[in-house]
Image (tube, grey):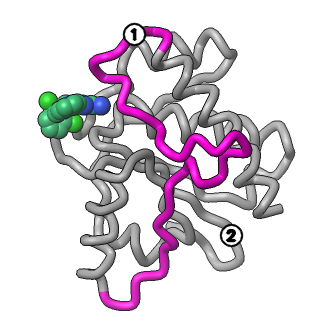
Amino acid sequence: MAGSGSKSVLFVCLGNICRSPIAEAVFRKMATDAGVVDQWVIDSGATSDWNIGSSPDDRGLACLTKHGIETSHRARQVTKDDFLSFAYILCMDESNLSELERRAKQVKNHQAKVELLGSYDPQKQRIIKDPYYGSAEDFEKVYEQCVRCCKAFLENNS
Ligand code: WE7
């Protein structure tokens, strides 16, 4: 839960095992390196309840390790409370976006701005594609997109 005055972001994808844990870990590393991590509540979640409690995908963990980033995240589903406690909910594709917008409408006085993480990409790649049925290269591409977008998002909120 975000304390008063703190900034908050929840990264979301379908299962919270591939894309959103990478985005969360990348953003936490950047905020840590910038010395502002204490000002932030950072988390990630799933639209589905399929993988609750699972570790991130091994390919995603390998990609993060390769870039010197760790995570101990376990998958969780987005809750109604998330729409009240987070300032930003940033998701990966149009399917995530329409699902989150549908759920936001069901929460009275929802606060969160629901956006595509890719809307922050200086290279204008709006969609961060699901790498689940993809290769290590697809995870690397997700990582690079997360780096560009998280950097821009952090700069916008500093
Ligand atoms: C995924 C996935 C991803 C697809 N992470 N899963 Cl088998 C399934 C069914 C409902 C929810 C989830 Cl989470 C999962 C397992 C976990 N990134 N991507 N499934 C996926 C990709 C393309 C077409 C259809 C699916 C279900």
Q: Residues within 10 Å of mark 2 (few under 14, many from 20)?
A: few
Q: Is residue 117 magenta?
A: yes
**148 or 64, nearer to the observer:** 148
Cα gap from disc 1 to disc 2, whole angstroms: 37 Å
Label 1 sits on residue: 135
Badge 1 marks a residue whose secondary structure is loop
Q: Is residue 27 rendered magenta in the image?
A: no
Residue shown at the point (50%, 50%) measured from the top left: 43
- Occupied quadrant, residue 28: top right
Taking the view exactly as shown, the residue that stands out farthest to the bottom is: 109
Characterize the local packing of mark 1: few (<14), some (14-19) or many (20 or more) Cα atoms within 10 angstroms.
Answer: few
Q: Is residue 139 above or below residue 49?
A: above
Q: Position of residue 73 (x, y in %)?
A: 44, 35
Q: What's the mark number on residue 27?
A: none
In the rendered view, does 109 fall on the left or right side of 126? left
Which residue lies at the image location 70% right of the left edge and 54% below the top edge? Answer: 153
Q: Residue at x 60, y 63 (%)?
A: 8
The quadrant in which the C terminus is found is bottom right
User: Residue 127 location, x and y as percent?
Assistant: 47, 43
- For the record, the magenta segment spans 108-137
Which residue does the numbered mark 2 point to in the structure image?
A: 6
How many marks the image carries: the answer is: 2
